[in-house]
């Protein structure tokens, strides 16, 4: 090989190899410090796109799980209030049974009816006051069919819509919670309701008729509670949300996370190559000095 001064090709070659080794070291350092195989789109464009879609689904499903838990809390709140209404209805039926017998006079029945009406007023108060995060549960705001739901306005109307999926498919992504009205008038008891069998127990006949009305009221209330229980069990059954999140996270990890052992092997290899390139570049830069010896320097 000829000895040149103007062009040191060995130094150029060593410099190129050094630059390549340092670029590889820089890439390995970035990956090792982040723990990710894909740190920029240049690392794996297709993998990055898949990973970001998975990350969005994971975040959405996790929020869906929180939505489910909130809905379960809402149902438990409504069921707790309905249980108190249950106790009031039982007391009202007890009072009706008391007033239905002929051993009480009219003044005593009026006193019994006074408590009866107070119980009815308390039922209405509970139904109107029970709310979850400002959403009234037992006053009829959430009653109706699923098709009655309208979420186009600032305040949604009709049955409550619980969203937990990543899309908007009714079979996969959300449930409706419809809760019947539990006021005394809706249950047909007390003087707040239309004049009927459960209106008053101030007379013996009225008390006897109220027994039937109260049985129907308890059945209506039980239907509300049974519906709440079935909805709660259905929401509990959406355990596959957590399984989906777990599987998606595992998939995302396989695509995106770095194999530390493999990358450290590459890092050490590139580190040795960089050190070798530095040493060889120093040697290559010293070779043109041999020309000085030929020139008598």
Image: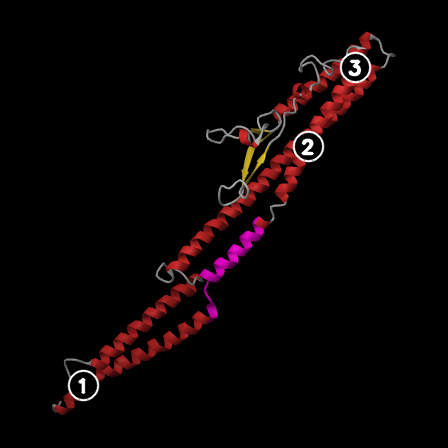
Q: Earlier in the sequence, mark 2 or mark 3?
A: 3
Horizontal and vertical percent position of residue 22: 32, 71
- In the figure, is residue 32 to the left or right of 277? right
Horizontal and vertical percent position of residue 130: 62, 28
Horizontal and vertical percent position of residue 85: 70, 26
124 in the magenta segment: no
Q: Disc 2 marks which residue?
A: 225
Q: Distance between the Cα atoms at labels 2 and 3? A: 26 Å
Residue at image position (45%, 64%) is 258
Horizontal and vertical percent position of residue 149: 53, 30
Which mark, by number, is residue 289?
1
Q: Distance between the Cα atoms at labels 1 and 3? A: 122 Å
Q: Disc 3 marks which residue?
A: 207
Residue at image position (81%, 15%) is 99
* Badge nearest the viewer, 1 or 3: 3
Task: Answer with the quarter of the image where residue 98 lies.
Answer: top right
The region drawn magenta spans 241-261
Residue at image position (71%, 14%) is 196
Q: Earlier in the sequence, mark 1 or mark 3?
A: 3
Q: Secondary structure at mark 2?
A: helix
Crowding at dot 2, Cα within 10 Å, few <14 / some 14-19 / many 20+, comes out as many
Q: Dividing the image into 4 quarters, which one contains the C terminus?
A: bottom left
């Amino acid at each position: 090989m000829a000895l040149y001064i103007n062009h040191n090709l060995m130094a150029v070659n060593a410099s190129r190899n050094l630059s390549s080794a340092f670029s590889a070291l820089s890439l390995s350092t970035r990956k090792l410090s982040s723990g990710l195989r894909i740190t920029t789109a240049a690392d794996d464009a297709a993998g990055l796109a898949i990973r970001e879609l998975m990350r969005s689904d994971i975040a959405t499903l996790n929020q869906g799980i929180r939505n489910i838990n909130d809905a379960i809390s809402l149902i438990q709140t409504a069921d707790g209030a309905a249980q108190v209404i249950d106790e009031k209805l039982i007391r009202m039926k007890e009072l009706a049974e008391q007033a239905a017998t002929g051993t009480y006079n009219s003044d005593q029945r009026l006193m019994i009816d006074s408590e009866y009406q107070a119980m009815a007023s308390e039922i209405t108060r509970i139904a109107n006051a029970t709310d979850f995060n400002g959403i009234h549960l037992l006053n009829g705001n959430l009653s109706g069919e699923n098709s009655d739901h309208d979420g186009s306005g600032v305040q949604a109307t009709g049955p409550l819509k619980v969203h937990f999926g990543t899309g908007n498919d009714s079979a996969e992504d959300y449930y409706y919670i419809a809760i019947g009205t539990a006021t005394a008038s809706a249950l047909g008891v007390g003087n707040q309701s239309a004049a009927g069998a459960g209106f008053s127990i101030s007379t013996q006949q009225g008390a006897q008729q109220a027994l039937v009305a109260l049985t129907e009221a308890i059945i209506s209330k039980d239907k509300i509670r049974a519906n709440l229980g079935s909805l709660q069990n259905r929401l509990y059954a959406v355990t596959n949300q957590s399984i989906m999140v777990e599987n998606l996270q595992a998939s995302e990890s396989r695509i995106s996370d770095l194999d530390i052992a493999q990358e450290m092997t590459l890092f050490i290899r590139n580190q040795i190559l960089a050190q070798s390139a530095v040493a060889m570049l120093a040697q290559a830069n010293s070779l043109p000095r041999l020309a000085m010896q030929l020139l008598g320097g």
